[in-house]
Image: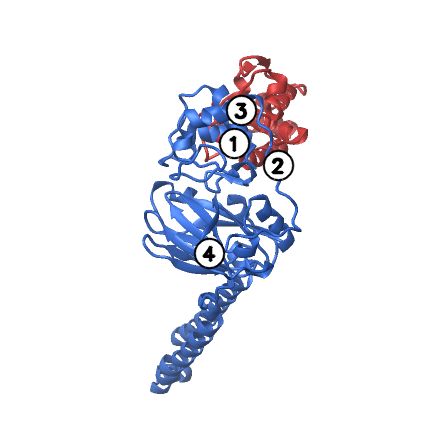
Amino acid sequence: MKSRITRQVPGRGLGLPGLARAGALTALALVSACKEPPTTRRMPDSAAASRGLALIDKVGCGACHEIPGLDWPKGRLGPSLAGFDDVGLIAGHLPNRPGTLAAFIRNAPAVKPGSTMPPMPLTEEQAADIAAYLYGIDND
Amino acid sequence: MIDALWGWPPPVLDPAGPYSERVTILAWVLLAMALVVTLIVVIALWIAVKGPDSLKRKLGGEKTVWIGGIAFPGVVLSVLLVWGLMMTGSLSEPITGKEMRIRVVGEMWWFRVQYLDNQGRVVMDGANEIHIPTNVPVVLELTSADVIHSFWVPHLSGKKDMIPGRVTLLRIEADRPGVFGGVCAEYCGGPHALMGFVTVAHEPEEWKQWAVQRNIALGEAIEPFGSVDVAGALPVVDDDVPPRIPPTPIVGEAARGRALFMSVGCAACHRVAGTEANGLAGPDLTHVGSRRTLGAGILPNHLGTMMGWIGDSQAIKPGIRMPSYDRLPAEDIAAMAMWLEQQK
């Protein structure tokens, strides 16, 4: 693909459309030469995230939390979870990492003694799916 | 409830009892007839626009009008009417007195449920959840405490309005156990769309156990288990049924929650049998911990949703009569929720 572009550009002459085209192709070549995103970057698993949203709906997290993507309910007793991926500490106390978050979702008082968020009727896998959804919310 | 109404096939096409089955058959026949008539109209239209002249002349002739315009609809509609009325007649057949009786009162925006004995006396109060045995006809005595509501469990029967000052009767019967969602089907104000309930059909033995745990006098509440037809007779409980589950001892936070429930005002509107909480304005909470849903069929029932509901019910179901208790500390809300969840 790239080799075909370089061969075509000189043969186009110096007409204005040709120049514009050459510029665009050069830009494209530059962009495509950019480094791939580092593989260590955490990308939310979209299948887990969609399972997570269904679970959020089923378990009723919305009774206390406003959660982007959930039309109803938007409870106000607990904190809003919009932009949760950018929050530094879970419940102002725990490092915001997927494993910690999943454990907190499933049994908050065990992870943060004194938490008023009660344990939820969820398995560990289900809690991990919900955590995946919360990290995948993109509303910045 | 919401869960129980989702999925394919839709509940109206998935009857779970003899009454809804007739409604479903009627719906399919209606659909089939609509297709036949549409087909006839499309063919006639094609002839009128593109067909050969001989056919066009026939289509516009007097004979076609007599047959297609008067005889055909007259005969078909009459037959359908008679057949439809005969088939759905059982939906409104007279009450024999042998059916199980349950009174359901529409309230803004929930359902009060009262189990009656065959003398019409209330043997147990409940809310937003109706428990019935399978293969037993149940007569629902529907009424309303405020505006017109409409009672609808699509799996079990058609709709029936709940009218203030009147009692309307609706028969339901389930031929298989299951949880069947229901809704208010008549706009009744702001939170109307969030006014639901569940109907739980149990195998008769399981229902019997359920009823005994709640002190429902079987002998009178339901005929198939043997009735006592003496006016003024006291409810009788069979001797061979398992004993009632002893109440869970209340300790720690739940005990504090119980005291809070009585002191912060909940007891003014809610009743919990066996306690001083005796309010009648809101749903009876005697067995709230065993219900499948909260907020009239809209949320799953567990400690978390109970807390969210107590703390800010207005955020979940805006406009309802229960205020948000967001002025209470979260620890107090948690304690009350804990106690309520123990009310099995």
Chain A hue?
red
Of circles 4 and 2, the one toward us is 4
Q: Secondary structure at mark 1?
A: helix
Q: In the image, B59: left or right of A35?
A: left
Q: Secondary structure at mark 3?
A: helix
- Location of residue A104 by image quarter: top right
Chain B hue?
blue
Q: Name the residue located 46 percent from the left edge and 41 percent from the top edge.
A: B296
Residue B246 is tagged as 2
Amino acid under disc 2:
Pro
What is the spatial separation of the Cα atoms under label 1 and label 3, in whole angstroms? Answer: 10 Å
The crowd level at tag 3 (other Cα within 10 Å; few <14, some 14-19, many 20+) is: some
Q: Return the x and y of residue B175 as percentages of the image width and height.
A: 59, 60
Front in this rendered view, residue B50 or A116: A116
The crowd level at tag 2 (other Cα within 10 Å; few <14, some 14-19, many 20+) is: few
Q: Which residue is mark 1?
A: B340
Mark closest to the chain's N terminus, 1 or 3: 3
What is the spatial separation of the Cα atoms under label 4 and label 1, in whole angstroms? Answer: 34 Å
Q: In the image, B146: left or right of B275?
A: left
State yes or no: discs 4 and 3 in contact (Cβ < 8 Å). Answer: no
Marks 1 and 2 share the same chain:
yes
What is the spatial separation of the Cα atoms under label 4 and label 2, in whole angstroms? Answer: 29 Å
What is the spatial separation of the Cα atoms under label 4 and label 3, in whole angstroms? Answer: 39 Å
- Location of residue B134 by image quarter: bottom right
Of circles 4 and 3, the one toward us is 4
Front in this rendered view, residue B211 or A76: B211
Residue B255 is tagged as 3
Amino acid under disc 3:
Ala
Residue B232 is tagged as 4
Of circles 3 and 2, the one toward us is 2
